[in-house]
């Protein structure tokens, strides 16, 4: 598969390295040329020597998307640090370029849910974190309640 990832921060670069390691063609687009360094963390060759592509530009510019290879993309990931940008570029990838698989990272759980209902596939790390934290605290509360039951029943006599 040819995968285009817009946003090469911690999330985008980690996904890019994993997808390249899995044997996919990966192109990254980021407005910060320094973000290229994240692609090479933990690898002993350059990103390009391993087959990766990196383009400096913004995902809101059609020319930059074209240069990064959107027209041949099988999958598109919008992973910038801005929900609005991710929503817009995901819709561009889906509607204008007909990319078969489009995923947008949306930090706001309410917006992520709303756009999911509008047909934009979203991943909401904030929602995942909330669910994990709630589950951990609920498990701790169950253990705490169970320990309290043992103390009250074991002290008769």
Image (cartoon, rainbow, N blue to C red):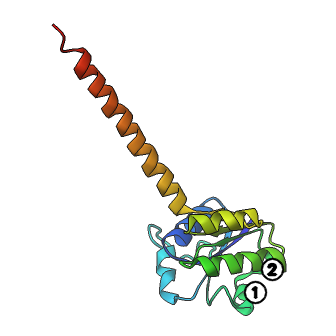
Q: Position of residue 29 (x, y in %)?
A: 62, 82
Q: Is residue 35 above or below residue 138?
A: below
* Residue at image coords 27%, 20%: 150
Label of residue 55 in the image: none
Residue at the farthest top position: 157
For mark 2, give the secondary structure: helix
- 53 on left or right of 139: right
Q: Is residue 124 above or below residue 143?
A: below
Q: Position of residue 13 (x, y in %)?
A: 53, 71
Quadrant of the drawing holding the C terminus: top left
Q: Position of residue 9 (x, y in %)?
A: 50, 76
Q: Mark 1: few, some, or many residues within 10 Å (few <14, many ≥20)?
A: few
Q: Is residue 54 visible?
A: yes
* Residue 64: quarter of image: bottom right
Which residue is disc 1 drawn over? 66
Q: Is residue 154 above or below residue 54?
A: above
Q: Earlier in the sequence, mark 2 or mark 1?
A: 1
* Residue 99: quarter of image: bottom right
For mark 1, give the secondary structure: helix
- 67 on left or right of 32: right
Which residue is disc 2 drawn over? 71
* Residue at image coords 56%, 71%: 12
- Cα distance in 3D space between marks 2 and 1: 6 Å
Q: Is residue 85 above or below residue 111?
A: below
Residue contact between numbered discs 2 and 1, judged by CB atoms under 8 Å: yes
Q: Position of residue 18 (x, y in %)?
A: 57, 62
* Residue at image coords 22%, 14%: 154
User: In the image shown, does 157 or 142 lie closer to the viewer?
Assistant: 157
Quadrant of the drawing holding the N terminus: bottom right
Q: Is residue 53 visible?
A: no
């Amino acid at each position: 598969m040819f995968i285009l990832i817009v946003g090469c921060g911690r999330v985008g670069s980690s996904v890019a390295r994993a997808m390249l390691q899995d044997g996919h063609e990966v192109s990254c687009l980021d407005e910060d040329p320094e973000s290229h360094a994240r692609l090479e963390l933990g690898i002993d060759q350059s990103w390009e020597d391993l087959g990766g592509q990196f383009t400096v530009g913004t995902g809101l510019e059609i020319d930059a998307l074209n240069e990064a290879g959107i027209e041949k993309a099988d999958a598109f990931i919008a992973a910038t640090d801005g929900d609005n940008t991710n929503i817009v570029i995901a819709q561009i990838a889906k509607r204008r370029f007909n990319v078969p698989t489009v995923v947008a990272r949306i930090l706001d759980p309410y917006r992520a849910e709303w756009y999911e209902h509008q047909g934009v596939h979203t991943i909401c790390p904030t929602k995942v974190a909330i669910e994990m934290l709630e589950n951990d605290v609920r498990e701790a509360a169950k253990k705490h309640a169970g320990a309290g039951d043992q103390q009250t029943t074991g002290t008769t006599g």
